[in-house]
Amino acid sequence: WSPQVRAEPQDEGSLPHRICNVDHQNKAGYTALMLAALAAVEQEEDMNVVRRLFSMGNVNAKASQAGQTALMLAVSHGRQEMVEALLACGADVNLQDEEGSTALMCACEHGRVETVKLLLAQPTCDISIVDSDGNNAVAIALEAGHSDIATLLYAHPNGTKAQPPLGGQVTAPGTSRDMVLPWHILCSNGKGSAALDRGWDHFQT
C-alpha cells in the first residue's frame, strides 16, 4: 500500500499545487525540490515531473541547517541533469551557503569538470567570490588537486579577477595559504614548455 494524494481538477500534466506546498521544509531543513535535486533519474518522463517541480518551487531556497541550495546539492552529488534543469529554472549560481561556498566552489572541490564548464557558461557566474576562509574557486580547485579545473577558471573571461597576477606566489586574502599561480598550473599539467614556446597569451583563449 502506498499513500496517494487527491488533487483538484487542473491542467493536464501539472502537479497538485493547490494542496501541496513544494517549498515546505522537513525537520532536516530540506524541501521536496532540494531532495529531488539529489535523485538519479533515468526516464525522461520522470525528469519532466522534476522540471515541473522546479518550475513551481523556489529554486533558490536555502536549507535551514547549512544554507545549501538545490543547485549546490545537485552539484555536490554529481547530478548533472539536475544542475541543467535548475539553471533553466533560474537557479542563482552565486548564492553562498553558511560557509560562503557557491555551487561553482562545490564543483571545483569535487573535480566535476563538466559541471564547472556549465556553471561558467552562465553569464552571471562570478568566479571571484570568496568563502568564509577567503578562498575563491581557483584556490579551492588547486587545494583539491584539480589543476585542470583551475586552468579552466583562469581561462574564463573574468579569470584574472580570481587569480593573482604572474610573477610569484602571493597570499590569498584572509588566509595564510600560498596560492599557486597560472604558470604553475600550466607546469602541473605538463604545458609549461609549450607556454614558453608559444607564449602565455595562447593559453588564455
Image (cartoon, helix red, strand yellow):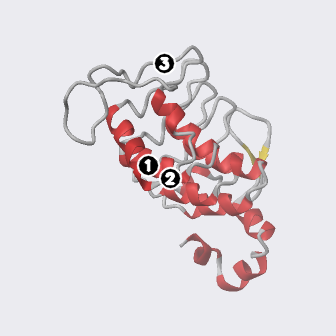
Q: Is residue 100 visible?
A: yes
Compare residues 44 and 8 and report the one nearer the observer.
8
Q: Tell me which amino acid carries mark 3.
A: Gln
* Mark count: 3
Compare residues 39 and 192 and report the one nearer the observer.
39
Considering every residue shown, the one lying at the far bottom of the view is 197
Q: State the mark number for residue 81.
A: 2
| Mark 3: secondary structure | loop
* Mark nearer the N terminus (2 vs 3): 3
* Mark nearer the N terminus (1 vs 3): 3
Q: State the mark number for residue 47.
A: 1
Q: Tell me which amino acid carries mark 1.
A: Met
- Circles 1 and 2, Cβ within 8 Å, touching? The answer is yes
Give the mark toward the camera: 1 or 2: 1
| Mark 2: secondary structure | helix
* Mark nearer the N terminus (1 vs 2): 1
Q: Examine the image and state in which quarter residue 167 appears.
A: bottom right
- Circles 1 and 3, Cβ within 8 Å, touching? The answer is no
Q: Is residue 102 visible?
A: no
| Mark 1: secondary structure | helix
Where residue 136 appears, as percent x and y from the top left, is 63, 43
Q: CA distance from mark 2 to mark 3?
A: 23 Å
Q: Which residue sits at x=80%, y=40%?
A: 177
Where residue 94 appears, as percent x and y from the top left, is 48, 39
Left or right: 128 as drawn, with respect to 135: left
Q: Tell me which amino acid carries mark 2.
A: Glu
> Would you name the residue on which mark 3 appears?
25
